[in-house]
Amino acid sequence: MTQELEQLRERALADLEQAETPEALEAWRVAYLGRSGEVTLSLRGIGQLPPEERPAAGQMANQVRLQLTEAYETRQATLETAALDESLRAEALDVRLPGRPPSLGYLHVITQVLREIYTIFGQMGFHVYRSPEVEDDVTNFQMLNIPPHHPARDMWSTFHTTDAGVLLRTHTSPGQIHAMRAYHPEPFRVILPGKCYRYEQVTTRSEHMFYQVEGLAIGQNITMADLKGVLESFVKEMFGPERKLRFRASYFPFTEPSAEVDVDCILCEGEGCQLCKHSGWLEVLGCGMVHPTVLRNGGYDPEAYTGLAFGMGPERLAMLKYGIPDIRLFYSNDLRFLRQFA
Ligand code: FA5
């Protein structure tokens, strides 16, 4: 029996050396030390031996069990240390490597143009006044002299919410009413920048969503000459003294008289191209003298006060300034386009 136990111990220790993984180690434990393992069975078999052999065999079997248990624990610790070393090596972080530079954002070209517009008008005494993008029909249209069913509404078709009369503003002109009511009865000069929405076909020159910057000056002696002077100074400051602008008589229900301002096309220098619809000119804004009804709606007496107003499209100004042939480039998130203005 003692010889058999000796052989069992030698075999078990040799097998243990071969166990390289936690699974192999567990299989070894079950095979030798488990409930039906060889060592356990040997211990149980001692009862069948002749009584004189039992003490020596029992002592030896216990010794073998203890030795193998110890050897098993040592092997287990060795494998765990090796696994830990391996994972530390595989997941090692070399802190000396240079980091990945975080990619820095920059201002969108339209934000840059808006800020330039604020600066130029700021120098002329206008400050920025914010008004809401979600408007009601009364302020977007009716207060601006555009009653329901007025044909001018066709030009300013928009997106409506499910609340009756609540819509996305088609222009920044409703801000005129908010500003007048806020400043009344003082004279004032403001610009009202923000997004506008139109339900119309998207083309190279028109978007569903675009910005406008409205301008409004209310005072006692403001004339059409002031309007022309302000806009001429703005265009020369924005595009350079060589740019030409022309005032074209136009119609807006909220100004009288009304005009549109075109700037000669920077892309073709007036020759005619896709950007300017082969006219040599690009319309950049609408303007006029504030209509007496609108002044009254804002709380000002049209007998005592007059006002100049204009509404310009910064996207169109950016197209002119940088020779961009298609308005859709601004909001289609193509970084190759946007990075040019970083
Ligand atoms: C207006 O929206 C008037 N509220 C402007 C105004 C204000 C007139 C104050 C008088 C007094 P209009 O629809 O023409 O007018 O738009 C004015 C400018 O906004 C245009 O000249 C153009 O530069 C820009 N714009 C208009 N529609 C679009 C569009 N769909 N996409 C891009 N820009 C546009």
Image (spheres, rainbow, N blue to C red):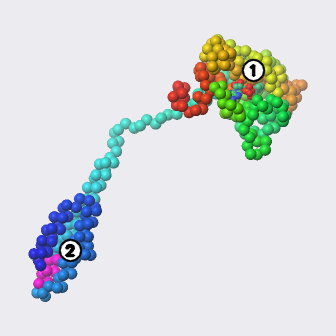
The foreground one among 229 and 142 is 142
Disc number at residue 260?
Answer: 1
- The reply, left or right, for residue 92 in relation to residue 42 is right
Please, what secondary structure does the residue beneath circle 2 have? helix
Quarter of the image where ligand 1 sits: top right
Residue positioned 25% across, 62% down in the render: 24
For label 1, being within 8 Å of ligand 1 is answered yes
Disc 2 residue: CB within 8 Å of ligand 1: no
Task: Name the residue furthest right.
Answer: 303
Query: Magenta span: helix, strand or loop, mainly?
Result: helix
User: Where residue 143 appears, x then y in whole percent?
Assistant: 83, 34
Give the secondary structure at mark 1.
strand
The residues colored magenta run: 53-62
Estimate the x, y position of residue 160 in percent, counting from the top left: 74, 40
Quadrant showing the N terminus: bottom left
Q: Residue at x 57, y 30 (%)?
A: 107
For label 2, the residue is 38
Q: Earlier in the sequence, mark 1 or mark 2?
A: 2
- Dot 1: within a 10 Å radius of its alpha carbon, few (fewer than 14), some, or many (20 or more) residues? many
Please identify the quarter of the rendering in which residue 117 is found: top right
Vertical arrangement, residue 262 with respect to residue 104, above or below: above
Residues tagged 1 and 2 counted as in contact (Cβ below 8 A): no
Q: Amino acid at mark 2?
A: Glu
Query: Which of the two residues, 179 or 89, is positioned nearer the viewer here?
Result: 89
Residue at x-position 64% and y-position 12%: 271
Q: Please identify the quarter of the rendering in which residue 301 is found.
A: top right
Q: In the depicted view, which residue is nearer to us: 132 or 284?
A: 284
Q: Which residue corresponds to the image point at 67% horizontal and 28% vertical from the top-left?
A: 206
- Whether residue 37 is visible, yes or no, is yes
